[in-house]
Image (cartoon, rainbow, N blue to C red):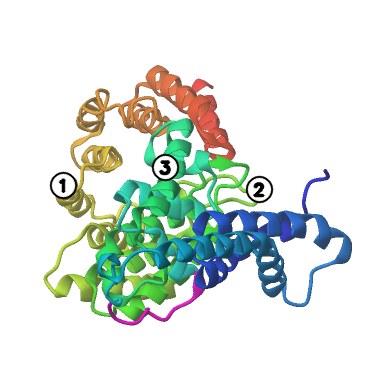
Amino acid sequence: MARLDPAIERRLRDLAPQVLGALMRKFRDFTACEDSVQEALLAAATRWPVDGLPDDPRAWLIRVAAWRMTDVVRSELARRKREEVVVSLVPPELQVVLPPGGDEPIEHDDALKLLVMCCHPALSTSSAVALTLRAVGGLTTAEIARAFLVPEATMAQRISRAKATIKTSGVPFAAPTAAELAERLGAVLHVLYLIFNEGYASTSGPALQRTELSTEAIRLTRALAALRPDDGEIAGLLALMLLTDARRDARTGPHGELIPLDQQDRARWNRAQIAEGIALVSTALARGSIGLYQIQAAIAAVHDEAATVEATDWAQILALYGVLERITDNPMVTLNRAVAVAMVHGPRAGLAVVDTLDADARIAGHFRLDAVRGHLHERAGDRAEAITHYRAAARRTTSSPERDFLMLRAARLAE
């Protein structure tokens, strides 16, 4: 089959979670709905390049996916009919009547509703996040595995088990209520954070950024913030996204090459997004609450407020990373703190922090570990060590722009 037109491919990726959400609202069988949506997407990939885009692509996909559900629904109705016959034979005193549900389902768009539904109470947080990234974010199993720092096969098993767990749990896979949203909020925010990250810095492929993912993550987080305007962590996450995304245009050169933060043209940063992000995180922190996303947003704000690289308040960034490290066990936070340590106390001090991560299986062998080591050795004047680590990082990354950037750094040091 010829390669699908990129514009159609992007349209299908954007519409997939909306179509799945629409089907779930009616049929509520995750596995069957997901299979039907995949068949509809395949049909669109075959038909649209020949027939052209339909007037309403979303409605077209929903209609085709719903047709695919017909046999599933017929089979389910037949099964229920058989069960009703069995139940009718049970004496009334032995029958169980379930109490009615809680408050009414929250009202929001299909993609956000699907996101909250996937963060199912029967699942562990990691399984819920993995399943949601697949259904809502449209990420591949390999991309999700890289986000979790685990092998792809492990992640594939985790997603399969998550679907099976939901099916056997007895807890409805249905539109969430406001109370259920509150219970699942931590997992929901983590999903949005990871979708944004994959969009802002793609872990694989020829492009550094996948704007459709980061833009959708911002849109969904705005929708969530509208539902819960007083939640500091939602505001913090939205601020973090805006403050980070504000640098998007300056992160790549004319040929899509990566431009690191210290070399970016800050005149190209989006000042409106920066102003909004700073206002959001300032208001959230003023309430007295301190959360994971608020601290990261504060770090991003320090970077964005600096008029030049030299004006960056690295001491404040280091202090914020220290707070962040105390509330989350994430090796990437420690790696980022190592860079801040190097900027305040020198590259040797930063390298000492990086060395503490060698025994952490979650990050050992990750390309960013070598990339940071290369950067710090370069700052320390250790050209040979820097070249070795830059090349090692380039071999390990699956992102073409990252690989090209690392190889270029090594080549320049070797001259």
Residue 161, numbered label: 3
Residue 46, numbered label: none
Q: Residue at x 39, y 27 (%)?
A: 370
Q: Is residue 369 left or right of residue 251?
A: left
Few, some or many C-alpha atoms within 10 Å of disc 1 (few <14, some 14-19, many ≥20)? some
Q: Inspect the image, locate mark 3, and give the three-letter code of the amino acid beneath it.
A: Arg
Whether 410 is among the magenta residues is: no
- Picture coordinates of residue 307 (x, y %)? 35, 62
Q: Give the residues in magenta.
A: 102-110
Q: Which residue is mark 1?
A: 322
- Closer to the chain start, of discs 3 and 2, is 3
Q: Inspect the image, locate mark 1, and give the three-letter code of the amino acid beneath it.
A: Gly
Prevailing secondary structure class for the magenta stretch in the rendered image: loop
Q: Is residue 79 above or below residue 385?
A: below
| Residue 356 sits in quarter | top left
Q: Which residue is mark 2?
A: 255
Q: Residue at x 26, y 30 (%)?
A: 354
Q: Secondary structure at mark 1?
A: helix
Q: Residue at x 39, y 33 (%)?
A: 150
- Picture coordinates of residue 201 (x, y %)? 48, 49
Q: Secondary structure at mark 3?
A: helix
